Image (cartoon, helix red, strand yellow):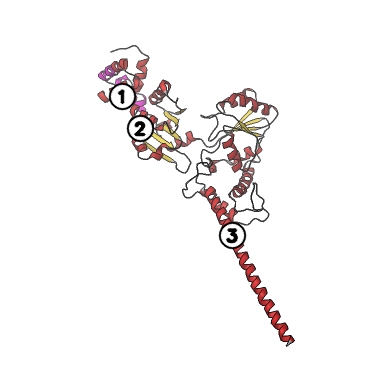
Amino acid sequence: MAKQEVLRREKQRSLLAGADAGRRAAMACAAAGTHLDEDQRAVGRAHHKVDLAAPRPWAAGDPIIALHQNQAALQQPLQRLVFRSRPGLRCCHPCPRAACAACAICALNIDSTLLQRAALDAAGAQSFLPGTLYVVATPIGNLADITLRAVHVLSRVDAVACEDTRVGGQLLRHLGLKKPLLALHAHNERVAAAAVMQRLAAGESVACISDAGTPALSDPGAVLVALAAAAGYTVVPLPGPSSALAALCAAGDAEGSQGQGFTFIGFLPAKGAERQAALNAAVADARTQILFEAPHRISALLAALASAAPQRRATLCRELTKQFETIVTRPAAELPAWQAEDPNRERGEFVLVLHALPARAATASDDDLPAATLHTLRTLLRELPLKQAVSLTAELCGAPRNLLYTRALAERGAPDAD
């Protein structure tokens, strides 16, 4: 009996131990499920930040450079880094987990390490001189457009002069870099340039970047470059993204590419007589014209071009390199109607390429305008503003507006003749 009792008690302990183990296993599974949910949510956040193969609604406060854009090229490397367990990996930011390979920020930092390594391999053997100003082109919307040389230089300079330190800081964080940032923008460029010159004098190297694109092209930087060059410091340009050249490449302006060249205007004056005069000059110039425009003025610009040069071809580029990039080429007269079809076409950043005039139109003379047309134009110019006089003459006489504008500009500086 005693032996049977001992066996019975051992069996009970075994059953109890098994039940306890089952409870522990269930608790472990529940805990694992919780962590798995956390991982899935973290991966979801990571995809929300970096995997933009499909359009997503973005919060208004999200950073504007590149995390919003379609970075499909980064998807597979980031997925490998996100889903691979990395024991002992420490976060670069406050995080409740000691190793958070699924964290979006850490995933980006892991990728930046690979990017820096690739930049070092590509440009590490190139010369890097102290006391040098590097003018660095940065992406205009798609971070994949940054060059390995730019990454390498930004990793080695002692400081970075930025148009906006918030935007510049965001770019450097994406690259896994931390540098002293100097604000250098349109309102303080001369004062800020003096601070940069002091650093150059101390033997430091400084990079100059704008919010997007190439510095000194409708962006700060030209004053700093001029001062540095005048003082004898080496200025090294790092070519890269440029919205003006990207638009020109996409325009397919065959006339302009055959030797006439192009004029980069940038932003027209905001309003008034100066704006109208600049627009008249652009329309009268036979060469390709490249203009920037803000979203709240783009409709007015397209309407003015449609009136001034209805048959002249123009390419409108919106949100270049970004998720909603749009490029359309039409006669200027058709662009206002095209834009009105969709309210979203008034949003974003715009580059407009006014194509070069055909060779015959570019070399047209008074002989191309009948005497009656010239008489009408001169009469109206005495009574009306140039734009209205040209518009009415074109309507009454059927003459090309481009040619009328060229002649009208010449008439403004000539004595009246009938």
Q: Which mark is residue 391?
A: 1
**Along the line of sight, the residue nearer the viewer: 28 or 264:** 28
Q: Position of residue 361 (x, y in %)?
A: 34, 26
- Give the SS element for disc 1: helix
Find residue 156 and report its image quarter: top right
Is disc 1 surrounded by few (<14), some (14 to 19) or many (20+) residues within 10 Å?
many
Q: Is residue 190 above or below residue 413?
A: below
* Residue hosting label 3: 34
The three-letter code of the residue at mark 2 reads Ala
* Residue hosting label 2: 332
Q: Main secondary structure of the magenta part?
A: helix
The three-letter code of the residue at mark 1 reads Ser
Q: Is residue 8 above or below residue 163?
A: below
Q: Is residue 14 above or below residue 240?
A: below
**Along the line of sight, the residue nearer the viewer: 307 or 49:** 49
The three-letter code of the residue at mark 3 reads Thr
Disc 3 from disc 1: Cα separation: 72 Å
Q: If you read the primary sequence from the N terminus, does the residue marked by circle 1 or circle 2 appear first?
A: 2
What residue is at 57 percent from the left and 40 percent from the top? 147
Q: Does any portion of residue 386 appear in the rendered image?
A: yes
Range drawn in magenta: 358-376
Q: If you read the primary sequence from the N terminus, does the residue marked by circle 3 or circle 2 appear first?
A: 3
Q: Is residue 204 above or below residue 34?
A: above
Q: If you read the primary sequence from the N terminus, does the residue marked by circle 3 or circle 1 appear first?
A: 3
Q: Are marks 1 and 2 in contact (CB under 8 Å)?
A: no
Disc 1 from disc 2: Cα separation: 15 Å
